Amino acid sequence: MRWTRDDVIAAAFATLEQEGLEGLSLRAVARRLGAHLNSVTWYVKSKQSLVDLMADAIVGTVPTGDLPDEPIARVRLMAHRYRAALLGRRDGGRLVAGTFTGGGKTLRVAEVIVAALLAAGFPEVEAARLCWAIVYFALGLTQEQQTSPADAAPGLAEALEPGGFPALAKVGEQLLAHDSFDSRFGYGIDRLLHLA
């Protein structure tokens, strides 16, 4: 049977969903396809090149159409769509973090965000840095959400009781509040965009 690069990527995503990022390898993808390793390496030469292609595919699912006219609202919506794409795949945050392929799909999303920031009046340097900040914040929070136990701060209440951390004790109730990752993300994006 003759495989295509799309077949390899589809098998890689199936492997990721079943095995997680730790179980993703070229050999595992070949096994899933029922193919020889050579058939996989014909299309992707290394695990990193496979991960790069997968990352670009994940970011490629971010819709860039049907956006609000107001630039900041566009940025906010794109940030939420980006995070949703990362959450749509097992270990999506970890997989995308640290990759940059220069692929058109990834650049298409950055183009929409930066264009909206420029339209909102941010200077060029700030627009570039703010785009990076939004991406890094989304990646970090997504990784935390995808790897954290249900109780994200076990033992925190007890650690704050002895009084060794007076500033943290003052905000302890807020730290211990079980607000959702969605609300944390929304608040963080609004702060980055100077809205909160």
Image: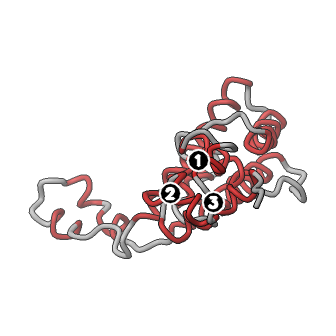
- Which residue: 57% across, 58% down? 92
Label 3: which residue? 35
Tag 1 secondary structure: helix
- Which residue: 74% across, 38% down? 103
- Left or right: 52 with respect to 97? right
Direction left: furthest residue: 162
Q: Are marks 1 and 2 in contact (CB under 8 Å)?
A: yes
Q: Residues within 10 Å of mark 2 (few under 14, many from 20)?
A: many
Task: Give me the C-alpha separation between circle 1 and circle 2.
Answer: 9 Å
Task: Give me the C-alpha separation between circle 3 and circle 1.
Answer: 19 Å
Three-letter amino acid code at the position of disc 2? Leu
Looking at the picture, does residue 87 appear above or below residue 150? above
Quadrant of the image occupied by residue 105: top right
Looking at the picture, does residue 190 appear above or below residue 155? above
Q: Position of residue 115 (x, y in %)?
A: 82, 37
Looking at the picture, does residue 143 appear above or below residue 161? above
Q: Position of residue 169 (x, y in %)?
A: 23, 60
- Which residue: 62% across, 52% down? 190
Q: Position of residue 60 (x, y in %)?
A: 76, 52
Q: Residues within 10 Å of mark 1 (few under 14, many from 20)?
A: many
Label 1: which residue? 51
Q: Which comes sooner in the sequence, label 1 or label 2?
A: 2
